[in-house]
Image (tube, rainbow, N blue to C red):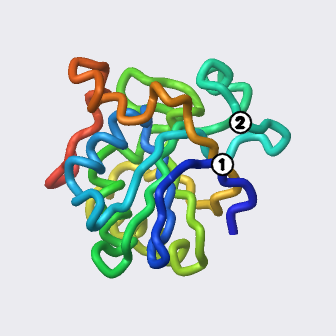
Amino acid sequence: MASNIVSKIKTTESSQLAAFAAGCFWGVEHIFRKHFNVPDQIVDIKVGYANGKEDIHSPSYKAVCTGATNFAEAVLVSYEPSRVSYKELTEFFFRIHDPTTLNSQGPDVGTQYRSGIYYTTPEQQDVAQRVKDVFQREWYKDSKIVTNIEPLKSFYDAEEYHQLYLHVNKDGYTCPTHFLREKPL
């Protein structure tokens, strides 16, 4: 379904890809890696840029930060469906950020920080919509979830210094909205 994935992400014969945008990609990658077993459940994760303008290829961080490219900071997840389901990944996604804020997470503001699920199969689309509906009904009754659910059209790995950023830079910036919620705020 994706037309242009440019990534050095590790895969296996049985792994599948999923893409999520939930604000600053450093924190999203970090919390996924802390919660799921790598490489057993999750084979690999790359931070990068998803679903921007079709005429822009391999955007830079600087260009994405201008908002002119319409790319979202996102994570591409290679996962083993026999060990972790897409539903589990999607539920986790909704629990680690605020899906009700448009084009922002905490102090990070701009279209690159939007909430998005970028599916790679029709089954993922169905699961994402069902999970979103449950969270809307049970967690965010009084606020509208603004998470976009759309096909993964493009993904470009971010520059190498962004990969594993919070693992390498232990005191690096983390968005205050990236934490695992047990219930809505």
| Quadrant in the picture for the C terminus | top left
Name above or below for residue 93 compared with residue 178. Answer: below
Separation of disc 1 and disc 2 at Cα? 8 Å
> Who comes first in sequence, dot 1 or dot 2?
1
Find residue 92 and report its horizontal and vertical position in percent. Answer: 29, 58
Find residue 43 and report its horizontal and vertical position in percent. Answer: 37, 61
Q: Are marks 1 and 2 in contact (CB under 8 Å)?
A: yes
Q: Residue at x 50, y 64 (%)?
A: 17
Q: Residue at x 43, y 36 (%)?
A: 25
Amino acid, disc 2: Ser
Task: Say whether residue 152 is left or right of residue 135.
Answer: right
Task: Say whether residue 63 is left or right of residue 174.
Answer: right
Q: Which mark is residue 58?
A: 2
Q: Which residue is mark 1?
A: 6
Find residue 52 and report its horizontal and vertical position in percent. Answer: 70, 41
Amino acid, disc 1: Val
